[in-house]
Image (spheres, rainbow, N blue to C red):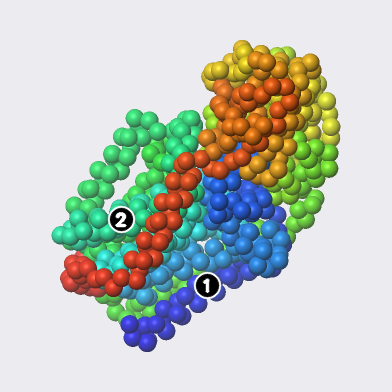
Amino acid sequence: MRRREWVWIACCLVALVYLNAYWCRQVFFLDHIGHMNSVHGLWMGFARLAHTAWHKPTWWRYSYDGMPFEFTYAPLVPGLIAGISRLTGCSLGRAFDLLAGFVFCFGPVAMFLMAREVTRRTGWSFVATLAYCLITPSQLVAPDAEFALRHLRDARRITLTFVWDDVPHELALALVMLAILFLVRGLRQRKTAPFLCAGVFIALAMLTNAFGVTTALIFMLCLLVSWDSGDWKRNAAALGVCGLLAYFAMCPFLPPSLIAVIRRNANLSSASGWSWVSAGVLATVAGVGILLWSLSRHWSRHVRFFLFLAWVFSAIPILAQWNLHFLPQPERYKVEMDMGLTLLFVFAAAPWVDRTPRLARVALAVILLFPAAAQVREQRRYAKNEIRWSDVHQTIEYQVAMWLRANLSEGRVMAPGTIGIWMNAFTSQQQFMGGAFTTLPTVPIQHPIWGLQHLEPSSQSVPLAMLWLQAYGVDALVVPGPESPEYWKPFHLPQQFGSALPLLWRERDTSIYAVPRTRRGLAHVIPASAVVRHEPPGFFAVDELRAYVAAVENPASPAAEWRWIDDNHGKIRETLPPGAVTSLQINYHPGWKAFANGRPAPIERDGLAQMVIRPNCNATCEIDLMYDGGPEAKLCRALSLITILVTVFAAGLPRRIRPASWGRTGRDRQPSPAN
């Protein structure tokens, strides 16, 4: 490129960064923006407690009775929060604010760079990105609430970034767009280096959240079908190998078992589960895509690419309005929808505008300048109101966490809603909930979670709920009432618990109740006959559960002491009579190994998905438990290391492949007059 072009690109980048930083500038100076109705606290909790989990298998004991760390959430955003906090010495809240502000400014930069690389049109790429920053076309066809033309001007991206939970989603989209930039360059030049760079960004997008996986796949498919069909096999191989190597490089944090869990949990929800209707919807979207491909065969390639992006990402949330879907959480794809529609509209109109007289183009720019300036002022006003400082110490989430740390720090607590989401941002409390539902590792634990929040007005409801809590080693229950500051208020009838459970603490219509237990702790000596053999099919299937809880709560049974040494290591001391086993109220995983008095002891999974240890001891028994991730974690880490080493080695090989046909035709540089 000529020097003038570089200067023009730099000016566009500076303008985009300045505009977005102008909107959100106070976020770079606040310690906390104060929106507790989000999962920001979840990421801060991971950043605070992950320790060595970023580079070795680690057991996360703070959510859902324990799970592998990779099941909690994609690690990139929590890892960045931890890194920023450690490097700058600032609080986790301030670190998140800095990251959110960076992502807000970084997304438009990535979009501009991708559009410029795909189209070679710097000016129109800037116009498209500016339109993406100013308007939200998704609200015209798939509005969040009621339809109104004024919603076109909604500052939806500000809300998603700073009020709700889309920082990982927006970061993943930005990384995918940078990956597309290098894939386009690689397909043009047929050199190894651009594909390696693309693979790095695809891997980072996958490490950001689950949307990074599906978004990257859709982008790559749209790129493939919009490329020159004469060399589609070579192009498909290049894109496929790039995506596959990217997955291998990051698979320790998205192993096959986690993919299966995400799919299972999505299918458990009627709102997002896969069905024969989903297959029909997917076939319809693909069929319309084929029709668009046929009708647009003579269009310029970049417009075809944007057409396919706009169609797929628009179809997902639009069809979801009629409960037609083929992806989980389809309404969340409005971020990609806004991006695709603005790119399509701007670059479809660009050839027509280019043919108008220069004076007319100047007049059009001046006319559009006034509503654009008004929109900039309006979004700044909105951002100033939403991005605000608040004292987190005055929130109910912080107050509950501090009381539990002072009075029940070693216990397990059920705290639904925002209280559980934010708990580990403040303390190291072990929780029966407190994580993301999409990666909840076991099915049985979902029965009490659902049942307790939807109790019927019956005298047997609370005793049944307590039976489940005792079976999972829960010591206390946090119940927000209808006047509680807690945002979600998940309990259907919160007043039922007050008449049946001892009250430990109450403030601002938020109560902490004790769960009656004879023996506190997570390890118990029980008869082998009391082990739950079958997975309960629902909340009311408690036949085996009653016998198990009776054995756990039997005051005459020998005591068992469980103590955490660190996240991956625990110790049990007990006296084991003949015919007894050890029930450990922690989720079973093949990565756990047990040694009783120095000898290996088998670990089994009971019907509640918890651990049963058969130590084969005589009387006094000391059991060491250690977690190493299991065969899958070791295999994924070995595969990741091999992939990274081979890729780094390949990066040094000066290999050149036959030039791409797009690079020969020049149709990407001279769009068809019809488009």
**The C terminus - image quarter:** bottom left
Q: Can residue 185 be seen in this view?
A: no
Secondary structure beneath dot 1 equals: helix
Which residue type does callout 2 highlight? Val
Q: Is residue 550 above or below residue 595?
A: above
Q: Position of residue 554 (x, y in %)?
A: 76, 16
Q: Residue at x 46, y 69 (%)?
A: 109
Give the residue pinned by disc 2.
Answer: 241
Q: Is residue 16 above or below residue 565?
A: below
Q: Where is residue 46 in the image (x, y as percent from the top left)?
A: 63, 50
Secondary structure beneath dot 2 equals: helix
Give the residue pinned by disc 1.
Answer: 17
Q: Which of marks 2 and 1 is in front?
A: 2
Q: Residue at x 65, y 15 (%)?
A: 579
Q: Which of marks 2 and 1 is nearer the N terminus?
A: 1
Specify the farthest residue to the left. 230
Q: Is residue 430 above or below residue 519?
A: below
Q: Can residue 653 be seen in this view?
A: yes
Q: Which of 119 and 638 is in front in this view?
A: 638
